[in-house]
Image: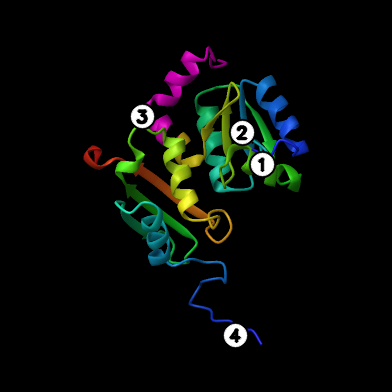
Amino acid sequence: MVIETRRKGWNAMAMAAEEIERLICESLPDARVNIEDLRGDGDHYAAHVVSEAFRGKSRVQQHQMVYKALRGRMGDNLHALALQTSVPDET
Amino acid sequence: MDMENPVFERIKNDVASNDVVVYMKGSPVFPQCGFSAAVVQILSEMKVKFRGIDVLSDPSLRDGIKKFSDWPTIPQLYIKGEFIGGCDIVREMFESGELADLFQKQGIVSVA
């Protein structure tokens, strides 16, 4: 018997902001992450990730690092993550 | 990269034979997703000739393109065979002027 818990407006595929942050920090321990739930549905977020690990990497590589940290949830559980990445003293 | 994936050959040909390619949901005239529409709009505003390839019409392409570029979402922009990024990066580059510079550097002129 599958107990389906549905938060207001969330589908079973949504993700909590805390989980996104946790996953990112697990792979990028020094990362500073701030996340905004754009629509309150757990599916459309904007995130700004700052990490020394991005230094010298292209934007695409930086974003790929974040997507790897999210272990395949990007595009599946997470429909939209407006991502911004930068190295510490650039912000 | 998984070389046996048959879709990769097709992708390689597409990005080699078209200067600017957008793998998208829907078509340039009828984009089926806001992010795809945003990239199409940027390219149209820059008056750059591009080829829009609809991944919705072919599930193997929709999956294959994500493996090919190691990028989990659609749309995906390619310029002269090189993966540039998705909607966020294209928008950021457009707003900073980097995209115009890249087109110029790659000899891609806008069609008046």
Q: Which residues are magenta?
A: B91-112
Distance from disc 3 to disc 1, alpha carbons, whole Å, reads 27 Å
Q: Mark 1, chain letter?
A: B
Discs 2, 3 touching: Cβ within 8 Å: no
Look at mark 1 in the image and give the residue it sits on: B30
Amino acid type, mark 1: Phe
Look at mark 2 in the image and give the residue it sits on: B22
Q: Secondary structure at mark 1?
A: loop
Question: Which marked residue is nearer to the observer: mark 4 or mark 1?
Answer: 4
**Quadrant location of the C terminus of chain A?**
top left
Q: Residue at x 53, y 79 (%)?
A: A6
Q: Which mark is residue B107?
A: none
Residues B94 and B12: in front is B12
Magenta segment's dominant SS is helix
Q: Mark 4, chain letter?
A: A
Amino acid type, mark 4: Ile
| Crowd band around label 3 with a 10 angstrom C-alpha radius: few (<14), some (14–19), many (20+) | few
**Quadrant location of the N terminus of chain A?**
bottom right
Residues B37 and A44: in front is A44
| Crowd band around label 2 with a 10 angstrom C-alpha radius: few (<14), some (14–19), many (20+) | many
Q: Residue furthest bottom?
A: A1
Q: Which mark is residue A3?
A: 4
Quarter assignment of residue B66: top right
Give the mark nearer the N terminus: 2 vs 1.
2
Q: Position of residue A22 (x, y in %)?
A: 38, 62
Question: Which marked residue is nearer to the observer: mark 4 or mark 2?
Answer: 4
Amino acid type, mark 3: Ser
- The answer to whether residue A84 is above or below residue B111 is below
